[in-house]
Amino acid sequence: MTGSSPAKRGRPGHDLESILRAAVTLFNERGYDATSIEDLSRALGITKSAVYHHVSAKEELLRLATGRALDELFSVAAGVEVLPGRAIDRLEHLVRGSVGVLVAELPFVTLLLRVHGNTRAERDALARRREFDQLTARLVKEAIADGDLRQDIDPVVTAKLLFGLVNSVSEWYRPGRAGHAGRQGAGSADVADAICKLAFDGLRAA
Amino acid sequence: MTGSSPAKRGRPGHDLESILRAAVTLFNERGYDATSIEDLSRALGITKSAVYHHVSAKEELLRLATGRALDELFSVAAGVEVLPGRAIDRLEHLVRGSVGVLVAELPFVTLLLRVHGNTRAERDALARRREFDQLTARLVKEAIADGDLRQDIDPVVTAKLLFGLVNSVSEWYRPGRAGHAGRQGAGSADVADAICKLAFDGLRAA
């Protein structure tokens, strides 16, 4: 649409970033399908055409939001893949880094995790999530082959449970609560520690 | 509404159960807010008034569906609370039983886990979920006090991660796939085994 030129994107008041954040909040609260550009403009106190100055369609907001979460997760994965050492250590780095992304970009990752696949943007996001899951499953298989991870759980199930555990944090973690402060600060590291202790060593007292 | 008398609920064609199942499928696919009684009647190939013969409102369907999932989870919890023995064993029973309910009533539990709290029925379901979570947290604290669970993770975080792990199964478990067959059959027990191994003893090879 005509409004998506760089000049208009930069105009003061509501920029693309603030519109995107408001959209993600609404999508997470009401569901993507149930949220219209009209709802978004009302929540922001601006006209629909002011929203359309920045984005061509609701789907563009979904693509931008899920893209941000995915780009950060793949950036962690790229960093992990070049690490030397054992697969189990790379897997732990992937878990820690993913918790960091989840906490730092909580609304964006929450939206990504709720994507169903009804539109092209959703299907594209799901395809990239599957790619990330496959990377995790490869690391799990490698760590089992190294003799570092238990062999009596199917590796695909292990990978799914491990990232189910990580992703479940989006259901209850709220930044700013006691002990949960800051971008990748103590809060994120505490949660990542708890997950790694539980997942790799188990809850049972030694 | 007049249509909710027992006689009309029992009329042939679409009974309350089949309407409820169709509604839950749509709610899970599109979101509760985005699904109307009109969408439901169209999916079932019946008129809106035929739907209103069975339920007074969309919210009644949500209440019935989340109620079924919650009743079964609390039934597991009630059975666990009277078990003799150590808290860690009761906790493991609670995890196994909850996985059984999740697998047996997958669409209903999936809906329950996606409830946001915008309507009275949703807030009531969330309140019962919190009650269940508190019960889990109490068992975790008791097992830590017994010296059976590690003390270096906050008990509330432990409880949240444990049930985050259980609930994450709803994201990927599909009944009828190889090795995942039957109501509380081998599939459910396999998943419950995997979760208990991971959560209590950890993934690291002994």
Image (spheres, coloured by chain):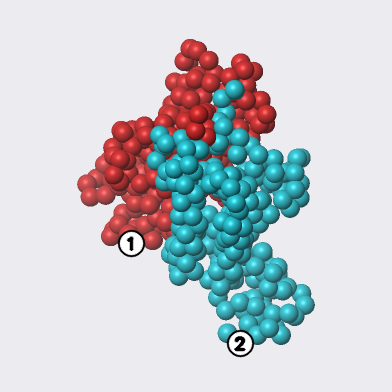
Chain colours: A cyan, B red
Q: Residue at x 69, y 46 (%)?
A: A188
Q: Nearer the viewer, residue A100 or A75?
A: A75
Q: Residue at x 42, y 46 (%)?
A: A156
Q: Quadrant of residue B15?
A: top left
- Distance from the alpha carbon under mark 2 to that under mark 1: 37 Å
Q: Which residue is under mark 1?
A: B42
Callout in the foreground (2, 1)? 2
Q: Secondary structure at mark 2?
A: helix
Q: Residues within 10 Å of mark 2 (few under 14, many from 20)?
A: few
Q: Position of residue B25 (x, y in %)?
A: 38, 52
- In this rendering, position of residue A169 left or right of residue A176: left
Label 1 resides on the chain identified as: B
Can marks 2 and 1 be said to lie on one chain?
A: no
Label 2 resides on the chain identified as: A
- Which residue type carries mark 1? Arg
Q: How many marks?
A: 2
Q: Is residue B22 above or below residue B161?
A: below
Q: Position of residue A175 (x, y in %)?
A: 71, 48
Q: Position of residue A94 (x, y in %)?
A: 58, 50
Q: Residues within 10 Å of mark 1 (few under 14, many from 20)?
A: few
Q: Which residue is under mark 2?
A: A2
Q: Residue at x 26, y 49 (%)?
A: B14
Q: Note whether residue A19 is visible.
A: yes
Q: Is residue A176 above or below residue B127?
A: below
Q: Note whether residue B199 is visible.
A: no
